[in-house]
Image: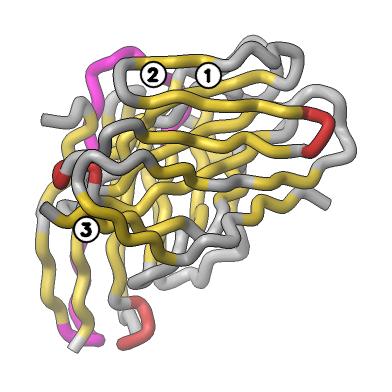
Amino acid sequence: DTEVTQTPKHLVMGMTNKKSLKCEQHMGHRAMYWYKQKAKKPPELMFVYSYEKLSINESVPSRFSPECPNSSLLNLHLHALQPEDSALYLCASSQAGTTPYSNQPQHFGDGTRLSIL
Amino acid sequence: AQKVTQAQTEISVVEKEDVTLDCVYETRDTTYYLFWYKQPPSGELVFLIRRNSFDEQNEISGRYSWNFQKSTSSFNFTITASQVVDSAVYFCALNHRTDKLIFGTGTRLQVFP
């Protein structure tokens, strides 16, 4: 079992739906990440939160909206997605470093497999 | 620019064979961190090892070993006496002064009984 919990594990939604992906960790990590992974490709970073503040947005379309309500939770709100957004969405967390960035290992959840109809 | 190259797209071996996964990286900085992750079919990425640029000691953990050579910018991963449970995609990654991991394209390892 991983220490980063993602729900739901699978999600099928239409292009007009609004849904949210959730991620939770209780390791005391203060850096949290969202990644998108297409089949047979490496994960692509989407967002980074450090101490509950958005520190990196990799030019992600506004139909993806991240939220970090507290140090243990990370959400990804989805609205008006396109078929090409179908992918595995991975959440990760790490200890925030003493420098402005974290060089600590990232710990990943099992992911949410998202299908857009 | 930072880059990680995993030239081996797919490797197939028979159980108990040794296998080495290659990783070559590019960075201009002197301080950086290298990682290996395993992604089984279930999807989660499992952290295996972190190595910083100042520590060139090789490491062994059970059947796993890592060979870090700064002179050739390589951080290779060897599995000794492979098992079917080792079947997965393995990613090498570089972290360089940001919160962003630079992943290689991954090597799919299939171990047949």
Which residue: 60% across, 23% down? A103
**Is A68 positioned to the left or the right of A51 in the image?**
left
Which residue: 30% across, 43% down? B17
**Chain identifier of the residue bearing label 2 in the image:** A
- Give the mark nearest the N terminus, 3 or 1: 3
**Residue A70, percent from left and from top:** 33, 26
Name which residue type carries label 3.
Answer: Ser
Which residue: 51% across, 71% down? A61
Alpha-carbon distance for marks 3 and 2? Answer: 22 Å
**Residue B81, percent from left and from top:** 27, 33
The segment highlighted magenta reads A14-32
Q: Which residue is mark 2?
A: A29
- Nearer to us of marks 3 and 1 is 1
- Give the mark nearest the N terminus, 1 or 2: 2
Is there CB contact under 8 Å for labels 1 and 2? Answer: yes
Is there CB contact under 8 Å for labels 3 and 1? Answer: no
Q: Note whether A104 is above or below A10 in the view shown.
A: above
Name which residue type carries label 2.
Answer: His
* Residue A51 in view: no
- Closer-to-camera residue (B40/A13): B40
Alpha-carbon distance for marks 1 and 2? Answer: 7 Å
Alpha-carbon distance for marks 3 and 1? Answer: 25 Å
- Closer-to-camera residue (B40/B80): B80
Q: Which residue is mark 3?
A: A20
For disc 1, the neighbor class at 10 Å (few under 14, some 14 to 19, many from 20) is many
Name which residue type carries label 1.
Answer: Ala
For disc 2, the neighbor class at 10 Å (few under 14, some 14 to 19, many from 20) is some
**Chain identifier of the residue bearing label 3 in the image:** A
